[in-house]
Image (tube, rainbow, N blue to C red):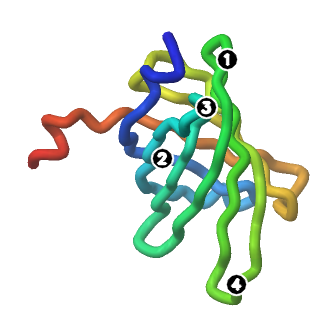
Amino acid sequence: MTVQDLVGEFAINGQNQDATQQPYQGKLKLQLDQYQRIIAHWQIGDDQIQHGTGFYKDQILVINFNYSNERHQVFKGVVVYKCITKDVLDGFWSEKHGDPRFLGTEQAFRISSKELLH
């Protein structure tokens, strides 16, 4: 598998980094920049947008991400995905100011072009 194989859109399911482990859903779009680094864009629920940049090696994808809340506070973190296949990613993540006793989790499943047409 190469970094180019990961380009595309994924449906995501995850759990937050706290004692409630509240579930969330959304989409993840992966692209490449001119240096073959990963550019990530998450849409979590209806209103949370997150951005990140990262790299891929040996079936591991690492992305540093950030987002702002409604009060314009910036949150930063890192997500690590094990690339099971080019269509299935299994990850865990942590935010700088998240509860250090927990890790968030996230699974991503490629959205096929056939599914996008419906």
Q: Say whether disc 3 or disc 4 marks the residue closer to the N-terminus.
A: 3
Which residue type carries mark 4? His
Q: Say whether disc 2 or disc 1 marks the residue closer to the N-terminus.
A: 2
The residue indicated by pointer 3 is: 35
Disc number at residue 13?
Answer: 2
Mark 3 Cα shell of 10 Å, populated few (<14), some (14-19), many (≥20): few
Mark 4 Cα shell of 10 Å, populated few (<14), some (14-19), many (≥20): few
**Circle 2: element type:** strand
Q: How many marks?
A: 4
Rendered location of residue 86, percent (x, y): 43, 20
Is disc 2 in contact with disc 1, using a CB cutoff of under 8 Å? no
Q: In this view, does 53 lie to the left or right of 74?
A: left
Is disc 3 in contact with disc 4, using a CB cutoff of under 8 Å? no
In this rendering, the answer to whether 26 lies above or below 111 is below
The structure residue drawn at horizontal position 70% and vertical position 48%, both measured from the top left corner, is 104
Rendered location of residue 61, percent (x, y): 64, 28
Which residue type carries mark 3? Tyr
The residue indicated by pointer 1 is: 57
Q: Say whether disc 3 or disc 1 marks the residue closer to the N-terminus.
A: 3
Q: Quadrant of residue 68?
A: bottom right
The residue indicated by pointer 4 is: 72
Choose mark 3 or mark 4, whichever is in front: 3
Is disc 2 in contact with disc 3, using a CB cutoff of under 8 Å? no
**Circle 3: element type:** loop
Q: Distance between the residues labelled 3 and 1?
A: 14 Å
The structure residue drawn at horizontal position 41% and vertical position 72%, both measured from the top left corner, is 46
